[in-house]
Image (spheres, rainbow, N blue to C red):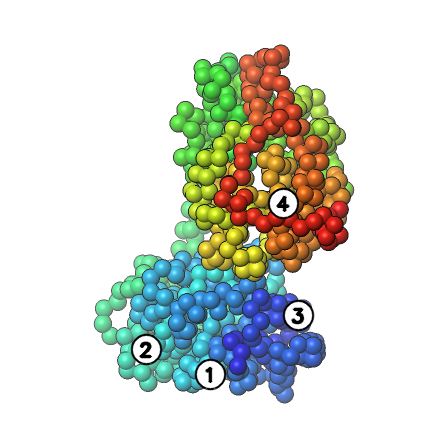
């Protein structure tokens, strides 16, 4: 008896079915059976199902003689299910990597509940990934399992069957089956949740819910949407047969009203001729199933507007309902138009203010800083700003950032909100402007202003004009605008000769290149062992473990997030000696890198300082991120996970073959990555040799005095007497944590290395 029976119905999904089936069979938790049901699909779904059944004994192929619909197809799969738990997956959706392992672990931790509810994310055809906005209702705090009465807000989530795992004995006991027609999930999910004696939740995305560009049957215009009334008849018939569940009638009634109002508001689904009948039947059901007693929001608060909608629909006042909807839509449109007009007027006033401020004298004691498109206090500009306040206390500094980042600024640094009058005043009158990206395109650099472009990484991938033949990787085709911006630079900061040569060719202009090193890396040479220990404690790294910072970069050849490691598997195979600090690239916004609830996986995507993460880590695992060049300054092990080098190089282009000149061991697969750490090769003698060569080429100037050189040259006008460069062999960067170093294993002999790991 397998742990899971995964039921996948298929009808006209031939383009997606293989990906769906692969997502099940490639799960790290193999104890499953996959029941694929061909609902007499006229395309290749049937043959695809047979191919998978022929090569994997875990797959059972079921072929229906006639197209019966999604509900009966699922019933056909249920009839053959033998697993402890039933999991449903539509033929165009996929299971997230590690989903079944996470579900199995949660079932064990919660005492095998009747129903486990987990999360999902919508995956759009554009590549966008959007997590369920109600995911906060899956918080795992509190009792491991519970009755629905303890968490009634679960009824306010999307009432679908595929975001839950059902104990098969419970399904058979309750005689749960799917009806025919559309909205077949409704008369299954409500009874399942209401009848369950134990429910648990899993705060993890386990299903990727595909949003197809051509939509689905539920987004087509058809009278079949009237099937929804039969489905809610079944829900209330179930309640009528269970007197002990009568108290749920008001809440189910409320959810039914919300469902009807949402469907009626959708102009795509209901044909024009069917809309009067829909409203009439909705009013009839809302009156018939209305429970007596006071109306209150209860666990699912309802707005006044929605309460009015429900009332008008229940009373059958379709014309009034429609009129109020039109008036409200017009009011919202007018409000948006007024807001746009106010915004346009404000921008005009701000630009006029900026022009007037440019007529006033420059402030020689004011320096304005910005990093990462007006993000928080970070990177090279932050290190320069701090050193400027130290060496020139008479200077005033200001930082451009949104309100959410202002609290992270030093107390002596003023915050400038982008687009504000103070922002434009500062851009107009500050003598010094420092950024690692670009300032506002409307910036008009004045005579006497000095603009320092620090950049934010050593370029491995192509940049600037070198992207003219890489349209897939170019964020903008405005190369003329790029050069206009570069023409405003007075100084360009470089961390090594490689960067100097790249930037001068890729972004040619008359700026002066300062080969001073990266100020953000100065901290690597100032921090002590106690500083490292304090950082590790603050991050929650378990004592005595080896902390590995995993920091992949973004992919230019795909819109969606890249596939990351199977963290559960990696940590399980490496054992308790290792902890992973996982950091997603900032281009993926606030979406966490992982939802795995592993005690030795720490998601540090939101941590404000990558330099602190580097100090806390004993090793770095990355792919093609420029972070490797900075981390090499620490002289700690680096492992490259280059599982898609050919695709990355083809889309973005690189300045050298990283595989031929890496900073350490190279893994081309997840298995090789695990092996590199399990055997100790990550810190062996060959790894040290490669790192030494890499440091000699790319860490020439990063000796801990970069910020001082910049401040003295640019702000204090001291061309002579700058700090001399410290030779590599004389540098003493912050040591790795002694506890982690002591836990490491010795490296095997050099002769025993696999050729796939080393160039």
Residue nearer the viewer, 537 or 587: 537
Tell me the residue that label 2 is attached to: 289
x%, y% of residue 563?
A: 61, 56
Q: In the drawing, what numbered circle is on residue 193?
A: none
Residue nearer the viewer, 741 or 666: 741
Q: How far apart are marks 2 and 3 (CA)?
A: 43 Å
* Residue 407 appears anywhere in the view: yes
Q: In the drawing, what numbered circle is on residue 683?
A: 4
Q: Distance between the residues labelled 3 and 1?
A: 27 Å
Q: Earlier in the sequence, mark 2 or mark 4?
A: 2
- Badges 2 and 1: C-beta atoms under 8 Å apart? no
x%, y% of residue 6?
A: 55, 75
**At numbered mark 2, what does the secondary structure look like: helix, strand or loop?**
loop
Packing grade of label 1 (10 A; few <14, some 14-19, many >=20) is some
**At numbered mark 4, what does the secondary structure look like: helix, strand or loop?**
helix
- Badges 1 and 4: C-beta atoms under 8 Å apart? no
Q: In the drawing, what numbered circle is on residue 18?
A: 3
The residue positioned farthest toward the left in the image shown: 293
Kindly identify the residue that appears in the image at 28 percent across and 78 percent down: 246
Tell me the residue that label 1 is attached to: 177
Kindly identify the residue that appears in the image at 47 percent across and 61 percent down: 204
Residue nearer the viewer, 555 or 577: 577
């Amino acid at each position: 008896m397998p742990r899971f029976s995964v039921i996948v119905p298929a009808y006209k999904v031939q383009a997606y079915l293989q990906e769906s089936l692969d997502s099940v069979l490639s799960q790290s938790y193999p104890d499953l059976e996959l029941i694929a049901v061909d609902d007499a699909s006229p395309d290749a779904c049937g043959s695809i199902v047979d191919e998978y059944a022929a090569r994997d004994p875990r797959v059972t192929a079921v072929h229906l003689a006639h197209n019966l619909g999604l509900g009966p197809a699922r019933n056909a799969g249920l009839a053959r299910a033998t697993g402890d738990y039933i999991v449903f997956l539509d033929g165009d959706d996929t299971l997230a990597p590690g989903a079944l392992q996470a579900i199995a672990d949660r079932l064990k931790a919660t005492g095998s509940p009747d129903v486990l509810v987990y999360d999902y994310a919508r995956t759009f055809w554009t590549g966008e990934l959007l997590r369920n906005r109600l995911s906060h209702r899956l918080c795992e705090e509190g009792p491991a399992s519970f009755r629905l009465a303890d968490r009634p807000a679960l009824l306010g989530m999307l009432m679908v069957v595929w975001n839950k795992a059902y104990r098969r004995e419970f399904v058979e006991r309750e005689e749960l089956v799917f009806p025919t027609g559309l909205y077949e999930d409704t008369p299954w999910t409500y009874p399942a949740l209401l009848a369950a004696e134990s429910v648990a939740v899993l705060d993890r995305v386990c299903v990727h819910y595909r949003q197809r560009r051509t939509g689905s049957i539920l987004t087509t215009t058809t009278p079949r949407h009237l099937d929804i009334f039969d489905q809610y008849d079944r829900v209330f018939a179930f309640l009528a047969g269970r007197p002990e569940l009568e108290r749920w009638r008001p809440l189910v009634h409320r959810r039914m009203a919300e469902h009807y109002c949402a469907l009626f508001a959708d102009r795509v689904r209901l044909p024009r001729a069917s809309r009067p009948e829909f409203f009439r039947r909705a009013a009839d059901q809302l009156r018939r199933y209305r429970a007596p007693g006071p109306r209150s929001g209860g666990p699912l608060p309802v707005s006044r507007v929605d309460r009015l909608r429900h009332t008008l629909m229940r009373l059958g006042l379709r014309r009034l309902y429609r009129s109020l909807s039109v008036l409200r839509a017009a009011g919202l449109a007018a409000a948006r138009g007024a807001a746009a007009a106010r915004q346009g007027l404000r921008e005009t006033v701000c630009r006029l203010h900026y022009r007037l401020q440019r007529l006033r004298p420059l402030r020689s004691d004011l320096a304005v800083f910005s990093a990462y498109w007006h993000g928080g206090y970070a990177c090279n500009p932050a290190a320069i700003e701090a050193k400027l306040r130290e060496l020139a206390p008479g200077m005033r500094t200001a930082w451009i950032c949104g309100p959410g980042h202002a609290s992270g600024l030093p107390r002596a640094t003023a915050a400038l909100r982008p687009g504000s009058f103070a922002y434009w005043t500062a851009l107009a009158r500050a003598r010094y402007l420092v950024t690692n990206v670009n300032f506002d395109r409307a910036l008009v650099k004045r005579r006497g202003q000095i603009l320092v472009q620090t950049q934010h990484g050593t370029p491995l991938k192509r940049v600037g004009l070198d992207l003219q033949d890489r349209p897939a990787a170019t964020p903008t085709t405005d190369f003329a605008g790029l050069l206009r911006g570069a023409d405003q630079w007075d100084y360009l900061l470089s961390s090594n000769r490689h960067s100097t040569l790249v930037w001068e060719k890729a972004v040619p202009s008359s700026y002066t290149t300062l080969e001073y090193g990266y100020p953000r890396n100065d901290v690597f040479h100032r921090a002590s062992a106690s500083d490292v220990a304090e950082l590790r404690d603050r991050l929650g790294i378990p004592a005595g473990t080896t902390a590995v910072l995993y920091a992949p970069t973004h992919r230019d050849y795909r819109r969606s997030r890249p596939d990351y490691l199977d963290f559960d598997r990696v940590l399980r195979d490496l054992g308790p000696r290792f902890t992973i600090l996982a950091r997603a690239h900032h281009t993926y916004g606030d979406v966490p890198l992982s939802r795995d609830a592993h005690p030795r996986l720490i998601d540090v995507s939101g941590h404000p300082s990558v330099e602190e993460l580097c100090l806390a880590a004993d090793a770095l695992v990355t792919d093609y991120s420029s972070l490797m060049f900075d981390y090499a300054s620490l002289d700690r092990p680096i492992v490259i996970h280059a599982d898609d080098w050919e695709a990355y190089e083809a889309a973005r282009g690189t300045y050298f073959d990283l595989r031929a000149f890496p900073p350490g061991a190279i893994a081309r697969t997840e298995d090789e990555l695990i092996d590199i750490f399990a055997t100790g090769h990550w810190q062996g003698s060959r790894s040290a040799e490669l790192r030494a060569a890499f440091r000699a080429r790319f860490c020439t100037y990063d000796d801990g005095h970069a910020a001082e050189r910049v401040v003295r040259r640019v702000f204090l006008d001291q061309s002579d007497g700058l700090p001399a460069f410290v030779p590599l062999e004389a540098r003493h960067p912050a040591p790795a944590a002694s506890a982690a170093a002591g836990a490491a294993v010795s490296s095997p002999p050099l002769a025993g290395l696999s050729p796939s790991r080393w160039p």
